[in-house]
Image (cartoon, coloured by chain):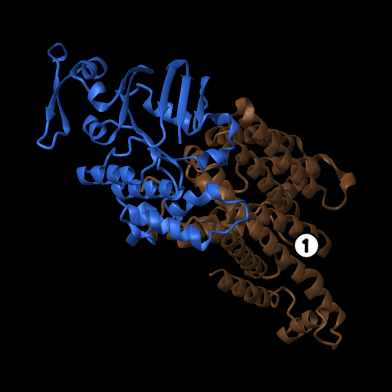
Chain colours: A blue, B brown
Amino acid sequence: MEIEAREIRVRLDGTQILNGTSITVGEGRFVGLIGPNGSGKTTLLKCIYRALKPSGGAVFLDGKALSAYSVKESARKSGVVAQHSDGGFEFTVLEMVMLGRAPHKRALERDSARDNEIAFGALNAVGLASLAAREFGTLSGGERQLVLLARALAQQTPCLILDEPTNHLDINRQLQLMGIVKAAERTVVAAIHDLNIAAAYCDELYALSCGSVVAHGSPEEVLTPEIIREIYGVGAELLRTGDNRLQISFYPLKETL
Amino acid sequence: MILVLIAALCVSLLLAVTVGSTHIPVAQVYGVIAHKLGLSDAEPERAIRDVVWLIRLPRLVLAIAVGAALSVSGAVMQAVVRNPLAEPYALGVSSGAYLGASLALLMGFGTALGGNAAGIMAFAGAFAVSVVVAMIAGIGGRANTVRLLLAGMAVSAVCSAFSNFIIYRTRSAERVQSVTHWMMGGLGAAKWETNAVTIAVVLLCFLFFWSRFRSLNLMLLGDETAVALGTDSRRRRIVYMLVSSLMVGFAVFSAGMIGFVGLLVPHVMRMLFGSDHRRLLPLCALGGAIFLVWADVLCRVVIPGAELPIGILTAMIGAPFFVYLMASRKYSFGGQS
């Protein structure tokens, strides 16, 4: 699936969050959004998954304007793992994942054996099938995040939208989660804080600063000491590991000390 | 579990019908029912038949309908505003009903409406207030939960002020007492004809909500998650609230205000059986019905020769039980555990 956000403008409570931001996500690409807190990554993603209506510009899914899709149709296009997992603690894990099937269901339709199969498949993919009957509220933060990923996988959408999916996860869970997303072979747009994770998993990066795209390209093109310095205000040193993976280490700049 | 509760409800009904201020042997009570259902040819005594068929049974059937309505509405409201304190009478329904009843009982509004003018006016008040709250919350197209709660509080305050003003201006203590009494709720006025309407409305509203169990589940997760999973909560919130008010309005119309059922039963059911509304709504309906049947039985026997308003009793036994459950189990209504 192809996503295009064209000239998105968002104003919230008098503050311009996005001023004409455009990104394009090609079929099957793994695209990362990087940038400091408040740069507009989450806001841009919210516009793409309809939690927010942009005050200007438009989002296109496969060339058709998002507003021309029903909410249900767009939920069949992209699944979301975001940071607001603040409800439904009395649901079991399986029930939670099963909600991912909701956009495929008509009002009175019951869950079928096939839905059950899909939900269990998604739980298997995140390695939590053994917790299916547990109450969601009793899980650890990392497990919850994986369950929410399983829910998005059960949605069986061509695209996944992830908003800082590795936040609050330990290193093992971070790599596990990103590995699952990569293995799912969907079109992915993800807001990512950890630049090393962004470098390791993304095909393409957009760097945002103050609501505008300041750089776009492959991780090698975007993650340069100059750009990192410009948007985060920190010094950066690029290293290559033995197997040629990009590693970035950071240090405070003199003037901020 | 649902089958167990259906069985429990049937047993409750059969036991409750034998209890009352007039002592009637159990065999004769069942004799009347069997005769009415065409199962027995033995003609029961007329007085006994009237007590069982025209007083006790309609009242119990109304208890079932009202209990189910309040509990289902409570569960729905808690999901709609994502707030554990939500209950059927929240968002202005209670003060609207209060104002309606005060107007009818103290100022003689709607006397043309017949014997249950207070009930009809209360229904009108409750529903009108819900519509106003929905409209205020919807200004600017963003009916989120906080706006809904705030609009409900504001409208409630206005209605209560007007009711209190009417009461303050009324010189007759007796009539003021009639309002207070009416507000405490009671099932004594049950009749088969009005029961039929109430049951039909409650059943239709229940089926409406039950068929939307997925949307209710998603609303519990919050607007942003819901939209990502294909449900636009903002529009649905208003519709669900109005349907719920309709159902509660009919409960108020036929039984006054019966507090705590709509808060207690949904929480207990959610604690015990989880949040999935496909299961939760029928469990609430049955649980609420059983609870109110027994509450009504207690009302009739606890003070010999008199009848306790049922609203007092539901709060008296409901609240401590609720606290016990809350203290003994880990339950947090979706958050901050």
Q: Chain of mark 1?
A: B
Left or right: A34 with respect to B145? left
Q: Residue at x 61, y 28 (%)?
A: B141
Q: Amino acid at mark 1?
A: Ala
Can you give x and y, in whole percent of width and height, for residue A249 in the image? 14, 27
Q: Which residue occupies the foreground of this view, B110 or B80?
A: B80
One can see residue B236 in this view = yes
Can you give x and y, in whole percent of width and height, for residue B64 in the image? 68, 64
Q: Residue furthest bottom?
A: B42
Q: Residue furthest front?
A: A27
Left or right: B263 with respect to B304? left
Q: Residue furthest top?
A: A255
Q: Residue furthest right?
A: B112
Question: Where B48 sits versus B233, above or below?
Answer: below
Q: Which residue occupies the foreground of this view, A73 or B224?
A: A73
Find residue A24 and report its image quarter.
top left
Q: Residue at x 38, y 23 (%)?
A: A40
Find residue B170 and report its image quarter.
top right
Q: Which residue occupies the foreground of this view, B257 or A158?
A: A158
Counting labels gives 1
- Crowding around mark 1 (Cα neighbors within 10 Å: few <14, some 14 to 19, many 20+) is many
Residue on which the image places disc 1? B190
Can you give x and y, in whole percent of width and height, for residue A42 in the image? 39, 29
Can you give x and y, in whole percent of width and height, for residue A103 in the image? 54, 46
Q: Which residue occupies the foreground of this view, B48 or A38?
A: A38
Q: Residue at x 86, y 53 (%)?
A: B115
Question: Where A130 sits versus A193, above or below?
Answer: below
Left or right: A204 with respect to B4? left
One can see residue A12 in this view = no
* SS under mark 1: loop
